[in-house]
Image (cartoon, grey):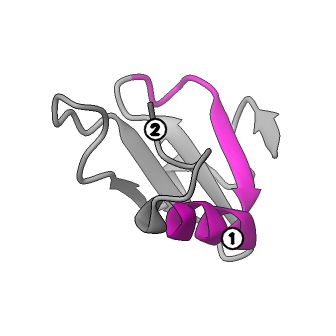
Amino acid sequence: MTDIATPPTEPTAVAWFKSSHSGGEGNECVEVADLRTEVTVRDSKNPRGGTLTVSTGAFTAFVEGVAQGRPGTSPS
């Protein structure tokens, strides 16, 4: 995983999708952009802040792990 200051593509040219649920209060505070070979994640409350970019394979494995309830993948 790489923490970068800005996504590799201009943020205005990227389609951001908000999560349907984040945390226990139902706040939609995480946005995801699929950049074909990478997935970029940012805080929707601070879109000009930092982003986290991972490979699509790593992101898919994370999402599948959360869905299956694997230890170490579910948010605390």
Helix, strand or loop under label 1 = helix
Residue at image location 48% in from the left, 54% down from the top: 32
Among all residues in the image, which is located at the extreme front? 71
Residue at image location 52% in from the left, 64% down from the top: 63
Indicate the amino acid at tag 1.
Thr
Indicate the amino acid at tag 2.
Pro
| Quadrant assignment, res 49 | top right
Cα distance in 3D space between marks 1 and 2: 19 Å
Magenta stretch contains residue 16: no
Q: Is residue 6 above or below residue 10?
A: above
Among all residues in the image, which is located at the extreme left? 26
Query: Which mark is drawn over residue 26?
Result: none
Q: Disc 1 marks which residue? A: 56
Left or right: 57 as drawn, with respect to 46: right
Magenta stretch contains residue 64: yes
The magenta stretch spans which residues?
46-65
Assign the C terminus to one quadrant of the image. top left
The local crowd at label 2, few if under 14, some if 14 to 19, many if 20 or more residues have their Cα within 10 Å, is: few
* Residue 37, horizontal then vertical, whole percent: 74, 74
* Residue 15, horizontal then vertical, whole percent: 43, 62
The reply to whether residue 25 is visible in this rendering is yes
Q: Disc 2 marks which residue? A: 75
The local crowd at label 1, few if under 14, some if 14 to 19, many if 20 or more residues have their Cα within 10 Å, is: some
Q: Is residue 63 above or below residue 31?
A: below
* Residue 5, horizontal then vertical, whole percent: 73, 29
